[in-house]
Amino acid sequence: METVYEAAGGAEGMLRLAAEWHERVMADEVVSHAFHDGARPDHTERLAAYWGEALGGPPAYTEAYGDEASVQRRHAGNGEHDEMNHRAIACFDEAVIAAGIDDERTRSVLHDYFAWATFNTMYRHHADDIADDQPVPQWSWDGLGSS
């Protein structure tokens, strides 16, 4: 069975999606606050590798950049920011369309993944509560940790 990663266009699809999302969040007056210190020059590539790995692709993020704990620590300690999360999700949904992902099922699964990640792994942790050596959470057509 095709993975969500493959259905979304593989590595090229993830890179298009990450670029479209990054463009939108940087233009959003609320979401761009998350980048007030600036984004890393390779943010789009890192994001594409992370999403790809989470959605059934190769372990490109883990091999090149780090583990899940490093991702969570980078996003930890920002307090509640529900409005920013909702706007980031809206930017993601727009980016999915702009990236050329036309299949409704794929769009729906991508939305569910991003909404879950935004309000869970990227939101609820304090840096000192994050366990080391975590794998990137895997998301399939059936959701978290499903095959």
Image (cartoon, grey):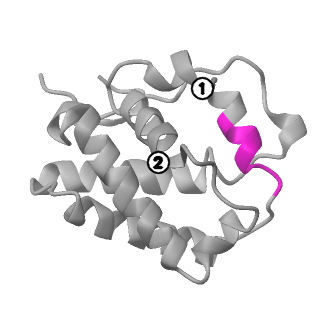
Work out how far the residue at label 1 is from the one at label 2, CA to CA, in angstroms: 13 Å
The percent coordinates of residue 137 (x first, y second) are 50, 30
In the rendered structure, the answer to whether residue 62 lies left or right of residue 122 reads: left
State the residue position of label 2: 44
Q: Residue drawn 57% across and 68% down?
A: 85
Q: Is residue 144 magenta?
A: no
Q: Residues within 10 Å of mark 1 (few under 14, many from 20)?
A: few
The percent coordinates of residue 99 (x first, y second) are 22, 57
Residue found farthest to the right: 128
Specify start and end residues of the magenta stretch as a single range.
71-77
Callout 1 secondary element = loop
Callout 2 secondary element = helix
Work out whether mark 1 precedes mark 2 in sequence or the reverse, and give the earlier one: 2
In this rendering, does residue 23 appear at all? Answer: yes
State the residue position of label 1: 65
In this rendering, does residue 141 appear at all? Answer: no
Q: Is residue 72 magenta?
A: yes
The percent coordinates of residue 37 (x first, y second) are 76, 62
The correct choice, above or below, for 84 with respect to 115 in the image is below
